[in-house]
Image (tube, rainbow, N blue to C red):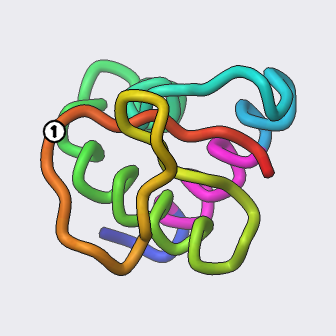
Amino acid sequence: MSTDARQRLRETILKLTHERGPDKTICPSDAARAVGGDDWRELMDDARETARDLARDGDVEITQKGEVLDPNAQWRGPIRIRAT
């Protein structure tokens, strides 16, 4: 993935989560769709990894079934992202 696309995903995740506030979440696909258009599925792994990076930096939290996940842990399945 290009640095430009990664930066756009980062900016989009931050924008979307902050627009929704800390009480609501976004799906990584929301950011992937905003950046990738019709090819958004190709960006899903990158969106999830970008969310991990942002969570490591303390900018967002990653949740699953309402529980905050450790961004360094191994996890699978659907996740949500929210502003901290």
Q: Quadrant of residue 20?
A: top right
19 displayed left or right of 44: right
Dot 1: what SS?
loop
Foreground of the two, 46 or 59: 59
52 above or below 38?
below
Q: Count the labels in the image.
A: 1
Q: Which residues are magenta?
A: 5-14
What residue is rendered at 37% in x and 37% in y? Answer: 64
61 displayed left or right of 75: right
Q: Which residue was labeled with disc 1?
A: 77
Foreground of the two, 8 or 15: 15
Q: Is residue 28 magenta?
A: no
4 displayed left or right of 13: left
76 displayed left or right of 78: left
Q: Residue 35: give x, y in percent of width and height.
A: 50, 37
What residue is rendered at 45% in x and 67% in y? Answer: 52
Q: Residue 49: give x, y in percent of width and height.
A: 36, 65
Q: Residue 42: give x, y in percent of width and height.
A: 19, 43
